[in-house]
Image: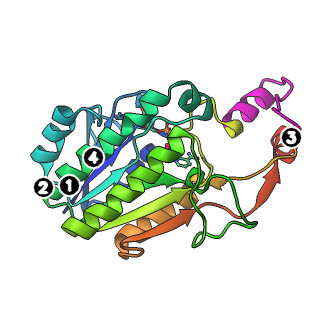
Amino acid sequence: MSRILVTGAAGNIGGALVSRLISYPEYFVVGVDNFLTGNSDNLPPKDHSNFLFVETDVNDFDEINDVMTQHQFDYVFHYAAVVGVQRTLSNPIGVLNDIQGIKNLLSLSRATGVKRFFYSSSSEVYGEPVEFPQNEDTTPLNSRLPYAVVKNVGEAFLKSYHKEYNLPFTIFRFFNTYGPRQSEDFVITRFMNQALQGNPITIYGSGLQTRTFCYIDDNIDTTLICLQKELFQNEVLNVGNDDEYTIHDLAKKLSR
Ligand SMILES: NC(=O)c1ccc[n+]([C@@H]2O[C@H](COP(=O)([O-])OP(=O)(O)OC[C@H]3O[C@@H](n4cnc5c(N)ncnc54)[C@H](O)[C@@H]3O)[C@@H](O)[C@H]2O)c1
């Protein structure tokens, strides 16, 4: 049996990942979350045979140390983070404190013999394009926003732990990912709620800005294949959808 830690387990992506992982009897999954944006409804029932939840702040070394030394995980999915455009812009120090969580998890993974460390980075690391379309091999990764800076630092820590201590890793650069567990301050959830209540949809800016949206099941299929087929070991993988919509078209589609 493989033991797997999922941080941010009560969130949108972490919750969906846990739900899929526990459908395999050969995995024992421990989920941790501090409920900053997560919700206990996103977790499996408490009596699930191959799942355990521990309320934990991963930025607190003693708390996450207890969980990691007790269970000796084979795999770690570190998905906990301060997220959301407004929340990260108005709480930059909270965002920067997530560097501590990354360091805690990596040092404990090394100490407890974790076989592979999976990390949720973000498309935000690409920052301002210097050429279009952006090229992942030549991008300067120039974003200055604390959220993106932390993701960049996280990526650098994973690569360095691999280089110095041979801790295998996979970095996922997630692009916009939506699903039923997503909190209400994200565009698809917000638009859907407004449409369902028969209210006008609030669009910021011209509405002509474009985005891509990846459904959660596609995200989970991808990350699970990486785990089970040992793909993209010590590599960075973009995970998203290449269909581009204007926000205006998205609003129209969801209203319909
Ligand atoms: N959803 C997206 O579009 C997207 C895009 C790029 C990257 N990501 C990354 O994917 C990961 C998951 O995002 P999500 O969409 O599921 O967001 P989410 O807010 O639904 O999930 C994050 C979870 O982490 C928890 N958390 C935050 N700080 C914590 C801490 N210190 N200790 C323990 N738990 C903590 C929150 O309570 C929440 O449940 C994040 O790292 C995020 O940066 C998401």
Q: Are marks 1 and 3 in contact (CB under 8 Å)?
A: no
Judge: label 1 CB < 8 Å from ligand 1. no
Q: Secondary structure at mark 4?
A: helix
Q: Residue 150, image x and y in percent? A: 45, 45
Q: Which residue is mark 2?
A: 112
Q: Which residue is mark 4?
A: 103
Residue under the image location 60 percent in, 54 percent down? 175
Q: Amino acid at mark 2?
A: Thr
Report whether residue 38 is seen. no
Against 203, is 12 above or below? below
Q: Residue 45, image x and y in percent? A: 34, 36
Callout 3: 10 Å neighbours few (<14), some, many (20+)?
some
Judge: label 4 CB < 8 Å from ligand 1. no
**Image quadrant of residue 179?**
top right
Label 4 and label 3: CA atoms lie apart by 39 Å
Callout 4: 10 Å neighbours few (<14), some, many (20+)?
some
The magenta stretch is 189-206
Q: Which residue is mark 3?
A: 207
Q: Earlier in the sequence, mark 2 or mark 3?
A: 2
Label 1 and label 4: CA atoms lie apart by 10 Å
Q: Secondary structure at mark 1?
A: helix
Q: Which residue is mark 1?
A: 109
**Image quadrant of residue 252?**
top right
Callout 1: 10 Å neighbours few (<14), some, many (20+)?
many
Label 2 and label 3: CA atoms lie apart by 49 Å
Q: Earlier in the sequence, mark 1 or mark 4?
A: 4
Q: Are marks 2 and 1 in contact (CB under 8 Å)?
A: yes
Q: Amino acid at mark 4?
A: Lys
Q: Earlier in the sequence, mark 1 or mark 3?
A: 1
